[in-house]
Image (tube, helix red, strand yellow):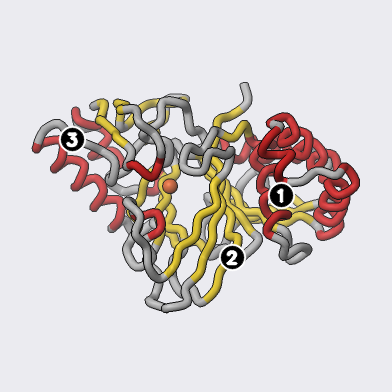
Amino acid sequence: MSQFIQKNDQFSIEENAQSKRILNITLSKAVIEQFLQKIKDEGINIQHLEYTPYERQVIAAYLEEIAGHSFGNILRDIVNDRATGGFTIGLEGVSKCTDEYVIFSTAIAHLVGISNFDSMTGKYYARFTVKDTDSSDSYLRQAYRLFTLHTDGTFVSEATDWLLMMKMVEENAKGGESRLLHLDDWEELEKFSANSLGQHKFQYIAPPSKNVQEIVHRQLFFLKNNRPCICFIDQFAYPESIEEAKFLKALSQSMESDKHVIELALPVGSLVVLNNEFWLHGRAPFEKHPELNRELLRQRGRFYH
Ligand SMILES: [Fe+2]
């Protein structure tokens, strides 16, 4: 059983029913109410958070003070823990206001670390909608297609240590769950990481919608604390030989077909935080519906040093 399992008056931590590598953190409603009230009392809104980076950390500190019990340390320890590396947390129905979802996710993210600039939106976070039709240039907003397993931040030069995804809105949505795979659960990890191409620096180029112009080269597998980590996305890799292309395709197919991939159930107003170096994420296809409407928020960033 995970060392993080605990319960006090402010929050409880349990194993997720779908994966023992994900911990479900449940804040008491009183903690969430006090936190949202504090934000109101201080007059902090989303624009303050967008324009003044330190406000993001200030509200993280408010949440930590109200939750107590070294709450921030626990979040950081979980995301850094190789055996787990992920948690879910939510507003427990206390608020249905999406502005408050942004505020809450910002506090959680900034207990874990510092959010990176998201070039797609020009903010420290991105909200994006999946609907019945889409004319964009990547799988991000294409509802009826499998969004293959990947890590984030492949085509930017800064580090992307962690990733946060929050469910903001969900209407007429069947399917579309986040598909997740922990690297240590992948049965063919050794086969691919030990291959000489496993150490190769692959070339990544972002599509126009990401607003990132640089070409970066990133090593596919790398060691951290003596354990293999991965940096991979199929859509934006530009192999420089047929051998590289075949290797990446086989790797992607192996991950997609692994029986340890989970499709995470996540209610509206809840979020998941994952270590981006040893958790892969993607999305299951939705079932066709003309009124499909789902909005997610993402933040990704680096750890404090
Ligand atoms: Fe992603």
The numbered disc on residue 169 is 2
Q: Is residue 60 left or right of residue 23?
A: right
Residue at x-position 33% and y-position 61%: 146
For residue 9, say whether it is visible. no
Q: Given the image, on which type of amino acid does mark 2 rest?
A: Val
SS for callout 2 = strand
Q: Position of residue 24 (x, y in %)?
A: 64, 55
Of callouts 2 and 3, the N-terminal one: 2
Cα–Cα gap, marks 2 and 3: 37 Å
Instruction: Report the residue at 49% width, 73% height from top.
Output: 173
Q: From the viewer's perspective, is the residue at label 2 or at label 1 nearer?
A: 2
Residue 62's label in the rendered image is: none
Q: How many marks?
A: 3
Q: Are marks 2 and 1 in contact (CB under 8 Å)?
A: no
Residue farthest toward the right in the current orientation of the protein:
41
Apparent side of residue 165 relative to residue 251 in the rendered image (left or right):
right
Local packing at callout 3 (Cα closer than 10 Å; few below 14, some 14-19, many 20+) is some
Of the residues shown, which amino acid type is indicated by label 3? Pro
Q: What's the residue type where badge 1 is placed?
A: Phe
Q: Position of residue 131 (x, y in %)?
A: 44, 67
Which label lies toward us, 2 or 3? 2
Q: Is residue 114 left or right of residue 188?
A: right
Among numbered discs 3 and 1, the one appearing first in the sequence: 1
Mark 1 = which residue?
104
Q: Which residue is mark 3?
A: 239
Dot 2 alpha-carbon crowd within 10 angstroms: few under 14, some 14 to 19, many 20 or more: some
Q: Crowdedness of circle 1 by 10 Å Cα count: few (<14), some, many (20+)?
A: many
* Image position of 70 with respect to 304: above or below: below
